[in-house]
Amino acid sequence: MAGVTESPLVTPGTVADPRVGQTIESLDTPTLLLDRPACDRNLQRMANHFASRPAKLRPHFKNHKCVQLARRQLELGAVGMTCAKLGEAEVLFDHGITDVLIANQVVGDAKLARLVNLAGRGDLRVAVDHADQALAISHAAASAGVVVGLLVEVDIGMGRCGVAPGEPAVALARLIRSLPAVRFDGLQAFEGHLVNLTDRDDRTRQATAAMRSAIDTRRRLEAAGIAVAVVSGCSSATYDSTGELAGVDEVQAGTYATMDRQYHRLVPEFEIALSVLVSVISRPTARKAVLDIGVKGAGGEFGVPEIKGHPELQIPFFLSEEHTVVNGVPDWKIGQLLELVPSHACTTCNLHREIVVHDSGIVIDVWPIEASGRLS
């Protein structure tokens, strides 16, 4: 399996969870659920898409933060994992997954000490967009006797991190090549400002134009005699557009594994596998219900969630910590169980410590979400 080594922290033969074999209706609420067959179909669909294409999958761990799911992605051909944070990478390394890209900047003495510790244990790459970051990583790595791979992050329109395409990126790459204990490996680029465009043709057109600026930067580097091992970027919403461009080597798709309400609108060929089992705890009026979940249990930055099987129902209020109000409800009873589909899977998984895996409503496993809450 790519990027996986044996780890002394992985203990085989753990005791089965007593919930295994029970129906999901027997579970307490709120409980994060994963429909295993739907998830498997999503994983296989994306793996099949890239099996015969030049670009390869480097899935984003931040979607689910679950080692079991990461292992499944690697078993299906992913070349390694992408992380948003150093803490996520540490979880993967501790579980034997040691081919990791941190698609973010790592800054500060405390983090650099952790970074170089990981670099001595496997193949680690980090994004940089400033000379000071490269110099600091070089110094820390040289002191530790390790080498860290660096990707120059190019801002292709998101206006977040990244140097400008073209000469600024080339100049930073030249600096990296002159430094000890770091290796210039290529470019990182993300068209995140465009992935939520609902018109798929428009999304394809704009995202492709944006990614071409990173590819053009690659060509400039190569023309200057600077080898580019990888251009890494893209998303679940652009896997079949920017992910198929010549000059893009890795696709950091994440949400496809679990899906959520927002991404399902963008790429409906992937199934919603993630939900949160919730209970009706109050019926203030004949047409209103209150559920036992709020923003502490489901991510809401892409809007309100949806009730599975009831897309027509209105959720006017989802800003409470522990409550969701639903209007226009049928004759739901106090204690009735429902499944809530979050608008954003990534922030939802980060709020939970485990995910209950089921097949047709029967619990088949319980997986820890090892990197939940790992924000540093």
Image (spheres, rainbow, N blue to C red):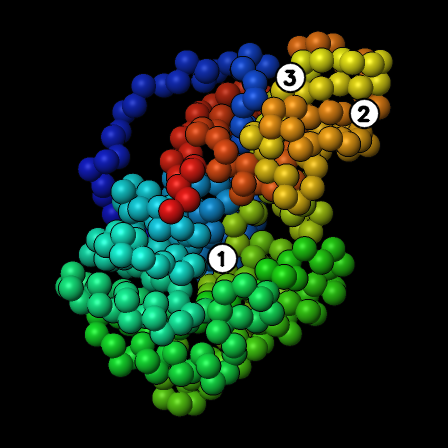
Tag in front: 1 or 2: 2
The alpha-carbon separation of the residues under discs 3 and 1 comes to 35 Å
Which residue: 51% across, 14% down? 22
The alpha-carbon separation of the residues under discs 3 and 2 comes to 15 Å
Observer-nearest residue: 117 or 341?
A: 117
Q: Is mark 1 on a helix, strand or loop?
A: loop
Q: Mark 1 points at which residue?
A: 252
| Residue 122 in sight in this render | no
> In the image, residue 177 lies at what x, y percent?
29, 79
In the rendered structure, which disc, 3 or 1, sits on the residue that comes first in sequence?
Answer: 1
| Residue 96 in sight in this render | yes
The alpha-carbon separation of the residues under discs 1 and 2 comes to 38 Å
Which residue: 52% across, 54% down? 253
Q: Which residue lies furthest to the bottom in this view?
A: 224
User: Label 2: how many residues lie within 10 Å, few (<14), some (14-19) or many (20+)?
Assistant: some
* In this view, 189 is above or below 361: below
Q: In which quarter of the image is residue 225?
A: bottom left
Observer-nearest residue: 2 or 232?
A: 232
- Inspect the image, locate mark 1, and give the three-letter code of the amino acid beneath it: Gln
* In this view, 134 is above or below 278: below
The disc label shown at residue 279, or none:
3
Which residue: 50% across, 60% down? 251
> In the image, residue 128 lies at what x, y percent?
39, 67
